[in-house]
Image: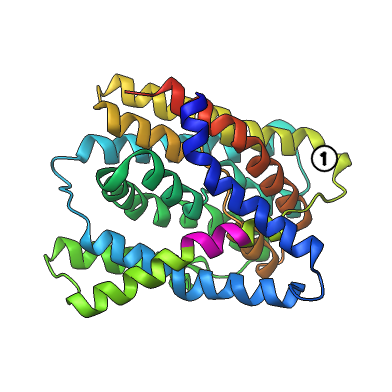
Amino acid sequence: MLANALLILPDFALILFGWVLARAFPQTYERNFWTGAEKLVYYALFPALLFNSINGAQFSLAADAMLVGAAVGAITSAAALGYAARPLLHPPADLFAGCVQTAFRFNSYVAFAVAQSLLGARGVALLALVMSVCVPLANLFAVYALARHRQTGMLRELAKNPLLIATVAGLATNLLDWRAPAFAANLLGRLGNASVALGLLCIGAGLTVAAVHAHRGVLSYFIAVKLAAYPAIAFALARALELPGLQTQLLVMFAAMPTAPSAYVLAARMGADAKPVAFVITTQTLLAMLTLPLWASLTAF
C-alpha cells in the first residue's frame, strides 16, 4: 500500500500545491485566474487529451469487450445507487439534481495521472477505451437529472459538452482507423500533457467546505457510493468476468476516482444547488488520498 501511495503522491501534491497557491497568494492567483484556467482545461486542454488518447489508443473492442462490459455495468450500478437516494432519503429536489452525479462521475485528470503512474502506456490506452464509453454515460446520467429539474432539453446540453464531443470524435476516428497526422498528434499531446498538471492545480484551488450540515446524511451517502460501493462493484464484476490483473486494477482504480470538479460547474450552470456539490467533491478528493492507495493494493497483480 505504501508503494502505491508513493506512486500516486505526486498527483495529490499538485492538488495541495494548487490549494496553497490560491490561499497563500490570493492577490496573484485570484479567483478570476483559476476560473480562466478551469475553462482552458475544460474547453481546450482536456478535450485535446481525450481525443488524442482515444484516437491513438491501441485497443480492440472485440478483444477488450469484457472490460468495456464491466465498466458499463459498474457505472450503471453506481448511477442506480445514486438515483436511489431520492426515494430512500428524500433530499431537496435542487440538492438531488446537483449531487446525484457525485455518485458516479469521475475525475478524469486524476484518472489519467494515476494510470500513467501505476499502469504505464498500456494502462493509459485501456483507460482511454473505458472513458470512451463511460464519459457519454456519465454525462447522460448527470444531465438527465439536471435537465429534468430545470426542465430544459437534455440532448441540447449533451451536444454542447466538450468532453463528450472529444470522446465521441476520438472513438469514431479510431474505429474508422484514421489517425491524426504526426504534427497534429504531437500538438494535441502537448496540450493534453498540460491539462493533467493544470487540472490538478485547479482542483486544489477549488477545494472548499460549504455549510451543508442539514444534509450530511444524503451527502455522506453519495460519498460512500462513489468511494466504496462503486469500486467494490467494479471489483466484483472484474472477478466474475475473470479479467486480467491489469484490467482489474484499472477498472477498480477508475471506479474509485473522486468526482470531477466539472460536476460543480455543470450543477451551477444548470440551476441546481452547487454548494453541496462543492462539499462532496472536496470531501471525496481528500478521502481519495487514502482510499485510492488502498484500492490499488487490494487489486495489485
Residue kind at label 1, given as amino acid type? His
Point out residue 212 in the picture as x, y percentages from the top left corner.
85, 45
Point out residue 186 in the picture as x, y percentages from the top left corner.
27, 73
Point out residue 283 in the picture as x, y percentages from the top left corner.
71, 41
Point out residue 172 in the picture as x, y percentages from the top left corner.
22, 65
> What is the image's colouring?
rainbow
Q: Residue at x 20, y 68 (%)?
A: 173
Residue at image mark 1: 215
Q: Is residue 165 something one can see in this rendering?
A: no
Q: Nearer the viewer, residue 247 or 97?
A: 247
Left or right: 172 as drawn, with respect to 216? left
Q: Is residue 111 above or below residue 174?
A: above
Secondary structure of the residue carrying tag 1 is: helix
Q: Nearer the viewer, residue 182 or 134?
A: 182
10 Å crowding of disc 1: few (<14), some (14-19), many (20+): some
Left or right: 142 as drawn, with respect to 187? right
Q: Tell me which corner region of the image, top left, top right, bottom left or bottom right, holds residue 28.
A: bottom right
Q: Nearer the viewer, residue 208 or 90?
A: 208
Q: Residue at x 26, y 24 (%)?
A: 241
**Magenta stretch mostly in which secondary structure?**
helix
Image quadrant in which the C terminus is located:
top left
The verdict on residue 174 being magenta is: no
Q: Is residue 62 something one can see in this rendering?
A: yes
Q: Residue at x 29, y 66 (%)?
A: 52
Magenta part of the chain: 196-201
Q: Residue at x 33, y 68 (%)?
A: 189
Q: Is residue 273 above or below residue 290?
A: below
